[in-house]
Image (cartoon, grey):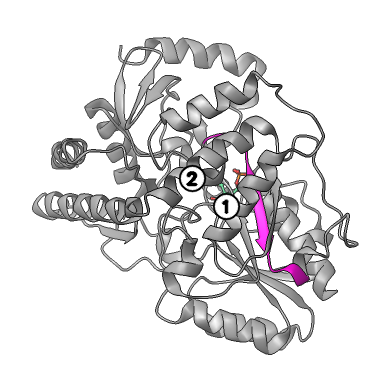
Amino acid sequence: MLYQRSSQLFTEAEEVIPGGVNSPVRAFKSVGGTPIFAKSAKGAYVYDEDGNRFVDYINSWGPMVLGHAYEPVVSAVIEKAKLGTSFGMPTALETEIAKLAVSMVPNIDKIRFVNSGTEACMSAIRLARGFTKRDKIIKFAGCYHGHSDSFLIQAGSGAITFGSPNSPGVTAGTAKDTLLASYNDIQNVKDLFEANKNEIAAIIIEPVAGNMGCIPPQQDFLEALRQICDDNGTLLIFDEVMTGFRLAKGGTQELYNIKADIVCFGKVIGGGLPVGAFAARNEIMNYLAPLGPVYQAGTLSGNPLAMAAGLAMLKALNADQAVFTRLEEKTAYLEKGIAKVLTSNNVLHTINRVGSMISVHFDANPVFDFETAKNGDNDTFKKFFHGLLVEGVYIAPSAYETWFISDALTYEDLDFTIRAVDKVSKDF
Ligand SMILES: Cc1ncc(COP(=O)(O)O)c(C=O)c1O
């Protein structure tokens, strides 16, 4: 059996960890089967406990944009660990990474580091509410901004996968302050502003959505949001947890030349350690404690190991900005190759891609929001997922996830993947 040891480990884990996993989407619920237990990873490959090797398109759900066990990150963490793993006092390292991040990303003066993307988004809306003195926020159906209460309202990703987008435990009081709009539907947003005059603190958006598969913003959509925010004294929050330091050095603000008021980061910024961050211009960031009245804190925030990993990662991306072009070219190559074999095997599909975010939807119609994303054929996706695993290719175990391409992938790896897609899709 291919995954015997993983199966045993899962059974053991289920005894002591709810569902056997520490984050629900790892549990394979939407694709069936037993989760594969990772043992190690290097470059473009992840190795499981049974000794199988997979070409990895999850890359820890995004952080490993330069591949696994990237040497400068690993050695930075080892060296720092020898000096102590946490102090609860400020360190020079935090200022160093903050300076670098602020120099790479447009329109931000200050940045605050936290421990996850969830914390970053949760803190960003508290800051926006405090700054504007308003309560309501707009989020888009199918976008995921972490698991804090205000966002578990038709959240994407794992929450869709489990068919319970409105999680029990989120109070009606909290939910009423989150207004829902459809992605790429500007009229919908205008209507919400009309109905909630002077009440909306912020719009939060994944500027390229990645939690209902990859969904690009349509022409002028982000510009229109910017305008509406300016007209109404509302802050525009870009959740760049997935897109930040991946689609461009300065994220989607740079890619589309649009200014956000607050930007949230996670994933790549920590180089694979638990890091999130949120950033804005001085006027907004100075509202945060200890300078201002909006409270936000963390025992392990700015942890030296996490900061060392993040700094090594950002330095590498800053020093070699051609990486973003290479990622784009590799992903475009993959897109073309997959489209060709799926077409020749008569599989109905739509492929969405922006830079190194890509997803294959098993539906021939355009996919531009949560409703159209839900039209994908999940039975086909399940066969696709398990077929690819057998061929040695690991994609996210959910039809609602983007694939994350890393620069460690070679063109041989991409050809290997395209051949695997060809083989698997012949049997659909
Ligand atoms: C766009 C986006 N925002 C926020 C989050 C939450 O980040 P974390 O899982 O680090 O809490 C995620 C996680 O996948 C995400 O994709």
User: Residue at image x 58%, y 22%?
Assistant: 79
Rendered-image quadrant of the C terminus: top left
Identify the residue under disc 1.
100
Q: Is residue 183 above or below residue 376?
A: below
Residue 147, visible in the rendered structure: no
Position of 363 with respect to 225 (left or right) is left
Does dot 1 land on a helix, a strand or a loop?
A: helix
* Residue 415 drawn at (x, y percent): 15, 40
Residue 372, visible in the rendered structure: yes
Does dot 2 land on a helix, a strand or a loop?
A: helix
Identify the residue at the far left of this view.
344
Q: Are marks 1 and 2 in contact (CB under 8 Å)?
A: yes
Position of 40 with respect to 78 (left or right) is left
Identify the residue under disc 2.
315
* Residue 254 drawn at (x, y percent): 46, 68
Q: Amino acid at mark 1?
A: Leu
Q: Amino acid at mark 2?
A: Lys
Position of 405 with respect to 78 (left or right) is left
